[in-house]
């Protein structure tokens, strides 16, 4: 064997192994169940992370407001050197010399009373924190619902692929049957051409269904915020295996439950409390403030005949002071602050009223849509059963020459449409059920997709 051939013989197995490894990695598919999708979304979703960060920021604000009740403490020290004419304490005359100095002091201040402004500010900060916690819970529900919605879209699109694949197989089988009929002279060649066109159209519809499926997967991957370059599979049962347990809902009870459970309504309630606290804090500007301060210190200078330790002991001083400030006229700033806080409080009440109206409308509309979905379940089940039976009969009639290909094709189209409508009805039913839970504020991320 020549040298180039021997080199190729050595390289070829390695290249084959690398290609095989790459192909295996490229074909590796990660399966993500519904519950895993929920866990991934709750862990990675950017909106949830932002809400969590806002929660942490508000916790810092509460800590800052709580710290306002504590005294402050400061320590100051300094050293200096002076040049030029100075008073000599020993001779009692001015001399041209230099001297060194050192001093230190410590001070502390405490707010005793400021019209309860600190109390009101702390109450307001706590109310905002509770509002942020409720908003965080609602954000989690929104993300869970987005996963539910997109996951249902994926499995519906996959179900449509299955329906279209069955149609392609059926059309191909019929095409082979017609080819045999034409060969023996039992059917006109026009039937063959027509069926070839129908089979090609069925394959085109399958391609469309596959494209819709990939688009649905892409949207779900975006919601989950996982690696968009990886391959994923989202397992789910076929439409005929999905349970359809009907639930009896009372629209008035749903609205009442939503008013009690919706985290965003609770968040708005806490914002109203925060607005009330802001009014109290603004009114504190009319009241006097009382503060207390403490201080102590000492100093040293080289001009003194006493040594450092004696000076630091003898020059020590302490002070305690009380300060009272009574507001007499502040250019109406306090009044305008109170008016502004009252307007914000009024807006918070209006926001609550508007939110309650929106919640009631959302819940009632979801209830009506659920009732429509229930009726659609019943109708599509009957329609699919009838379309299946009609197609079977039409197939038998065509086989014996009692029906035309046009009639058989139309019957098959009605069956495919009925199967697609049935799949949509099943998954739409579960979507509407989850939508009620979402609008009601009771959406549980631990529940299975179909229950």
Image: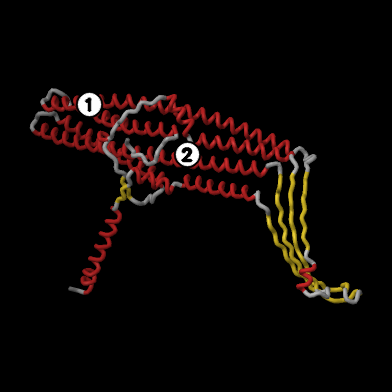
**Rendered-image quadrant of the N terminus:** bottom left
Residue 114 in sight in this render: yes
- 199 or 164: nearer the eye? 164
Q: Which residue lies under the disc numbered 1?
A: 385
Give the residue displayed 76% in from the left and 37% down from the top: 332
User: Do we see residue 204 in this rendering?
Assistant: no
Q: Residue at x 29, y 39 (%)?
A: 158
Q: To which quarter of the image does residue 128 belong? A: top right
Q: Which dot, 1 or 2, sits closer to the camera?
A: 2
Q: Does 82 appear above or below 267?
A: below
Mark 2 packing: few (<14 Cα in 10 Å), some, or many (20+)? many
Question: Is 385 situated above or below 313?
Answer: above
Q: What secondary structure is marked by label 1?
A: helix
Mark closest to the chain's N terminus, 1 or 2: 2
Position of 336 compared to 345: left or right?
right
* Secondary structure under the numbered disc 2 in the rendered image: helix
> Which residue is identified by label 2?
138
- Residue 283 rendering spot, x and y as whole percentages: 70, 37
The span from disc 1 to disc 2 (Cα, nearest Å) is 42 Å
Colour setting = secondary structure
**How far from the left and from the top, in percent, is residue 328?**
80, 40
The foreground one among 423 and 108 is: 108
Left or right, 416 with respect to 333, comes to left
């Amino acid at each position: 064997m020549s040298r180039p051939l021997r080199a190729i013989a050595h390289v070829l197995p390695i290249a084959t192994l690398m290609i095989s490894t790459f192909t295996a990695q490229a074909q590796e598919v990660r399966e993500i169940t519904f519950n895993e999708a929920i866990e991934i979304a709750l862990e990675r979703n950017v909106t949830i992370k932002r809400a969590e960060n806002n929660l942490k920021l508000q916790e810092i604000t509460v800590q800052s407001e709580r710290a306002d009740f504590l005294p402050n403490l400061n320590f100051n020290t300094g050293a200096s050197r002076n040049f030029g004419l100075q008073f000599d304490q020993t001779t009692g005359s001015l001399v041209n010399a230099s001297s060194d100095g050192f001093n230190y002091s410590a001070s502390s201040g405490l707010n005793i009373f400021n019209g309860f402004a600190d109390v009101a500010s702390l109450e307001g900060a706590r109310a905002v924190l509770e509002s942020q916690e409720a908003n965080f819970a609602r954000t989690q529900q929104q993300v869970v619902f987005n996963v539910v919605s997109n996951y249902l879209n994926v499995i519906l699109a996959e179900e449509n692929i299955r329906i279209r694949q069955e149609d392609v197989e059926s059309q191909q089988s019929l095409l082979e049957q017609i080819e045999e009929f034409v060969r023996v002279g039992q059917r006109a060649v026009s039937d063959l051409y027509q069926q070839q066109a129908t089979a090609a159209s069925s394959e085109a519809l399958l391609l469309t269904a596959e494209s819709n499926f990939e688009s649905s997967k892409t949207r779900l991957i975006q919601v989950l915020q996982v690696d968009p370059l990886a391959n994923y599979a989202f397992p789910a049962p076929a439409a005929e295996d999905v349970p359809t347990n009907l639930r009896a809902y009372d629209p008035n009870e749903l609205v009442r439950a939503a008013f009690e459970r919706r985290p965003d309504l609770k968040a708005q309630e806490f914002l109203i409390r925060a607005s009330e606290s802001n009014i109290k804090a603004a009114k504190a500007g009319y009241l006097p403030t009382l503060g207390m301060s403490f201080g102590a210190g000492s100093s040293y200078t080289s001009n003194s005949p006493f040594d450092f330790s004696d000076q630091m002991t003898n020059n020590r001083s302490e002070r305690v002071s009380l300060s009272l400030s009574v507001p007499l006229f502040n250019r109406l700033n306090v009044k305008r602050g109170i008016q502004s806080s009252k307007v914000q409080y009024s807006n918070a009440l209006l926001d609550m009223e508007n939110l309650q109206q929106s919640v009631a409308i959302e819940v009632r509309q979801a209830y009506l849509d659920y009732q429509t979905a229930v009726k659609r379940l019943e109708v599509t089940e009957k329609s699919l059963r009838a379309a299946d039976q009609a197609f079977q009969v039409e197939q038998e009639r065509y086989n014996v020459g009692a029906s035309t290909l046009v009639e058989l094709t139309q019957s098959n189209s009605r069956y495919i449409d009925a199967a697609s409508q049935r799949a949509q009805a099943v998954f739409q039913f579960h979507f509407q059920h989850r939508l009620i839970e979402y609008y009601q504020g009771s959406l549980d991320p631990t529940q299975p997709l179909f229950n």
